[in-house]
């Protein structure tokens, strides 16, 4: 098949939707399909068949920094669709009328259009904005053969905001890349390692984690523990200032931004990997990555997207409740048996998210849609 992934945002970033698109694209290519990427303003050169169809501007939405397309060139989009004759267009949703909306509008009738719904709003304002977007697009949604959601919370929101009934087909992760993760040499000692990995923005909860670290420090529970903060973002200076003020500098290290190639090794080095997001998550790709890499224990913020992956209540936390957060971390710091039980559950949990499993399911959806188009 000739498959076009459609994404309004840039593919220069490594956020969840971009990871979904590229993981599936690489796997489908290995399976012998021709994959194209119809995307917003993108400059990377390592992907074949990449078509940048708009200029984009940076916006803040759902507590994230993302890019939104300006109106794309309709003639250029029509010419591309006529030239490539795609069997399937796989659209990442919600989408903008300025770029992906035009691709859908000009797609020929014989092309099957599949959608994946990714979003779960952080606030009522974002929920309302998405509802209005869905209201404006309901007529064009009739062109879709099928829409799936990456999690049950995302499916519920798609039903509410877009009146779409969607099956859940989870995010795809190239598990083999994370199984190859090895504990970093500088962490190969008798200390326990806690790792936070994520953007340093408010909703990701790193400050709540550091406040909890201070509680543990006051209880003298961190004498044999190191804490690694991996990531960059607008809160970096205030987080470092907090560490300095609380005299945690001998315990907490800031690793800064790391590449996707380095990520498996940092996660493999974690005795406890901590992801205390307060909301706005439709899934939890990083949780799956950490479990696949071999982190002994994965602790997740108790939000709907992360709960859909981390189904063990004793590994979920309300990040703002630093007393309960500290109690949970203490439990896993002092009990090697608890860490072992968590790791055994996590190892069994990740298999359904492998790109081979998810990709095979999506191929079945593509094929069914094409059969229906031909009848």
Image (cartoon, helix red, strand yellow):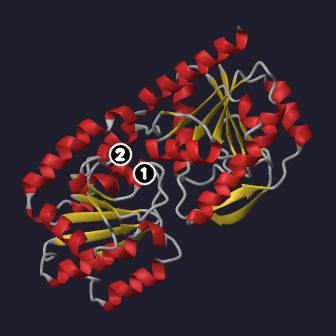
In the visual, does 350 lie left or right of 219?
right
Q: Quadrant of the N terminus?
A: top right
Q: Residues within 10 Å of mark 2 (few under 14, many from 20)?
A: some
| Label 1 Cα neighbours within 10 Å, binned few <14 / some 14-19 / many ≥20 | many
Say which residue label 2 marks. 309
Q: What SS does tag 2 mark?
A: loop
Res. 32 image quadrant: top right
Q: Residue at x 66, y 13 (%)?
A: 372
Q: List x then y, in percent, for residue 310.
A: 31, 48
Q: Image height check: is 240 above or below 330?
A: below
Q: Residue at x 82, y 29 (%)?
A: 81
Residue at 62% from the left image edge and 40% from the top image edge: 163
Is residue 47 among the parts visible in the rendering?
no
Disc 1, SS: helix
User: Quick one: which residue is furthest to the right in this view?
Assistant: 75
Residue sitting nearer the eye, 113 or 183: 113
Task: Say which quadrant the C terminus sits in.
Answer: top right
Provide residue 186's location: percent of width, then percent of height: 25, 63
User: Considering only vertical position in the picture, is 157 above or below 144?
Assistant: below
**Residue 183 % position (x, y):** 26, 53
Q: Is residue 254 above or below residue 315?
A: below
Check the image and report above or below for 92 versus 60.
Answer: above
Picture mark count: 2
Residue 248 appears left or right of 96: left
Circle 1 sits on which residue?
305
Q: Residue furthest bottom?
A: 245
Q: Residue furthest top?
A: 375
Is the residue under label 1 in contact with that under label 2 (CB below 8 Å)? yes
Say left or right for 143 vs 250: right
The x and y percentages for residue 252 are 29, 76
């Amino acid at each position: 098949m000739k498959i076009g992934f459609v994404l309004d945002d840039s593919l220069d970033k490594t956020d969840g939707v971009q990871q979904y698109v590229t993981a599936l694209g690489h796997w489908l290519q290995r399976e012998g399909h021709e994959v194209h990427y119809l995307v917003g303003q993108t400059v990377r050169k390592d992907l074949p068949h990449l078509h940048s169809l708009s200029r984009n501007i940076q916006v803040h939405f759902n507590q994230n920094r993302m890019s939104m397309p300006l109106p794309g060139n309709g003639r250029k989009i029509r010419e591309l669709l006529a030239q490539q004759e795609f069997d399937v267009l796989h659209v990442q949703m919600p989408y903008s009328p300025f770029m992906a909306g035009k691709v859908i509008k000009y797609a020929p009738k014989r092309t099957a259009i599949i959608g994946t719904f990714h979003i779960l709003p952080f606030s009522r304002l974002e929920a309302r904005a998405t509802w209005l977007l869905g209201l404006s697009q309901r007529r064009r949604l009739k062109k879709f053969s099928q829409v799936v959601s990456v999690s049950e919370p995302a499916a519920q929101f798609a039903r509410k905001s877009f009146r779409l009934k969607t099956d859940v087909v989870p995010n795809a992760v190239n598990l083999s890349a994370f199984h190859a993760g090895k504990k970093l040499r500088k962490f190969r000692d008798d200390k326990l390692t806690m790792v936070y990995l994520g953007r340093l923005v408010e909703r990701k909860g790193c400050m709540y984690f550091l406040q909890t670290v201070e509680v543990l420090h006051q209880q003298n529970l961190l004498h044999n523990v190191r804490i690694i903060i991996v990531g960059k973002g607008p809160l970096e200076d205030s987080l470092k200032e907090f560490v300095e003020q609380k005299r945690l500098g001998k315990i907490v290290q800031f690793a800064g931004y790391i590449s996707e190639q380095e990520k498996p090794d940092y996660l493999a080095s974690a005795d406890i990997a901590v992801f205390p997001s307060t909301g706005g998550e439709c899934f939890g790709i990083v949780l799956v990555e950490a479990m696949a890499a071999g982190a002994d224990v994965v602790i997740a913020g108790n939000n709907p997207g992360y709960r859909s992956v981390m189904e063990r209540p004793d590994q979920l936390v309300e990040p703002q409740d630093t007393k309960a957060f500290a109690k949970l971390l203490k439990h896993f710091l002092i009990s090697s048996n608890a860490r072992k039980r968590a790791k055994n559950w996590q190892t069994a949990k990740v298999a359904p998210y492998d790109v081979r499993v998810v990709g095979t399911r999506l191929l079945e959806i593509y094929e069914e849609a094409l059969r229906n188009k031909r009848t």
